[in-house]
């Protein structure tokens, strides 16, 4: 009996547990699975994958650089857009002053008026010259067909000598800055003269038929 009791604890300590064997087996399977996945991608394929990632990254960087350059150029070229638009008021005021003086009955046909108008013309030419140096140019409109991108029709003027829709009067001068519209020209366009006699005859005939 004593020998059996002494051997029992020795046998219990020396036998490995079932749970430890199971954990070791699972760990070995995980390691084996990881190695198998890595072996599925060859070195050439991995290099190709990295090259694709680098190519996409460089393409995105280049697109960002181009956008930045475009925004910088626009800021440089059109940064004075608002100032230029406000500066056009100087030309408008000169033109209004000129019209007021020319319509003043007391000043008409006087030497004083002629001198004033000469000075106003000089100032106007100087302003146009300054604008031109900064790529601000007046829009040509007289005797041209109405272009809604650059001209805005304000009135229609009867004129059989011009094709309908032809600009025959400039009310306010328009300007562009480089390839952008600074403001459109306000214009009057031609339309056919209505034949009042023919119109009266047509109206009379319509009344009789009714």
Image: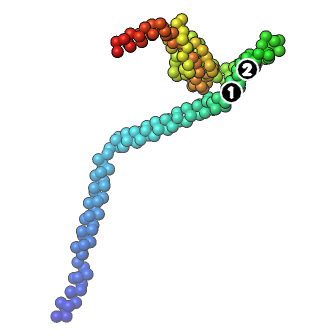
Does dot 1 land on a helix, a strand or a loop? helix
What residue is pinned by disc 1?
A: 89
The image quadrant of residue 68 is top right
The image quadrant of residue 46 is top left
In the displayed structure, would residue 199 be above or below residue 83? Answer: above
Within 10 angstroms of label 2, few (less than 14), some, or many (20 or more) residues?
Answer: few
Which comes sooner in the sequence, label 2 or label 1? Answer: 1
The answer to whether one can see residue 115 in this image is: no
Residue 138 horizontal/vertical position (percent): 63, 19
Marks 2 and 1 sit apart, C-alpha to C-alpha, by: 16 Å
Residue at 54%, 5% (x, y): give it.
161
Looking at the picture, tell me which residue is in the foreground, 123 or 179. 123
The answer to whether one can see residue 208 in this image is: yes
- Horizontal placement of 210 versus 73: left or right? left
Does dot 2 land on a helix, a strand or a loop? helix
Given the current orientation, which residue lies at the most extreme right position? 112
Looking at the picture, tell me which residue is in the foreground, 3 or 114. 114
Residue 93 horizontal/vertical position (percent): 71, 25
- Horizontal placement of 94 versus 47: left or right? right
Quadrant into which the N terminus falls: bottom left
The image quadrant of residue 78 is top right
Looking at the picture, tell me which residue is in the foreground, 70 or 25. 70
Residue at 24%, 84% (x, y): give it.
10
Residue at 57%, 25% (x, y): give it.
180
What residue is pinned by disc 2?
A: 100
In the displayed structure, would residue 54 be above or below residue 145? Answer: below
- Horizontal placement of 163 versus 1: left or right? right
Given the current orientation, which residue lies at the most extreme left position? 1
């Amino acid at each position: 009996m004593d020998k059996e009791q002494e051997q029992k604890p020795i046998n219990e300590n020396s036998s490995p547990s079932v749970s430890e064997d199971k954990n070791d087996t699972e760990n070995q399977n995980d390691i084996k699975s990881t190695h198998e996945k890595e072996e599925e991608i060859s070195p050439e394929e991995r290099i190709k994958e990295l090259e694709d990632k680098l190519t996409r990254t460089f393409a995105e960087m280049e697109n960002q650089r181009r956008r930045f350059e475009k925004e910088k150029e626009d800021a440089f070229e059109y940064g004075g857009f608002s100032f230029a638009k406000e500066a056009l008021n100087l030309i408008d005021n000169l033109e209004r002053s000129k019209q007021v003086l020319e319509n003043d009955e007391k000043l008409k046909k006087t030497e004083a008026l002629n001198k004033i108008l000469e000075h106003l013309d000089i100032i106007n030419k100087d302003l146009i010259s300054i604008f031109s140096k900064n790529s601000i140019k007046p829009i040509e409109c007289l005797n041209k067909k109405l272009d809604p991108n650059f001209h805005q029709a304000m009135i229609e003027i009867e004129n059989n000598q011009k094709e309908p829709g032809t600009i025959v009067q400039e009310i306010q001068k328009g300007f562009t800055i480089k390839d952008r519209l600074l403001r459109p020209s306000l214009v009057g366009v031609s339309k056919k003269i209505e034949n009042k006699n023919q119109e009266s005859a047509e109206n009379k005939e319509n009344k009789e038929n009714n």
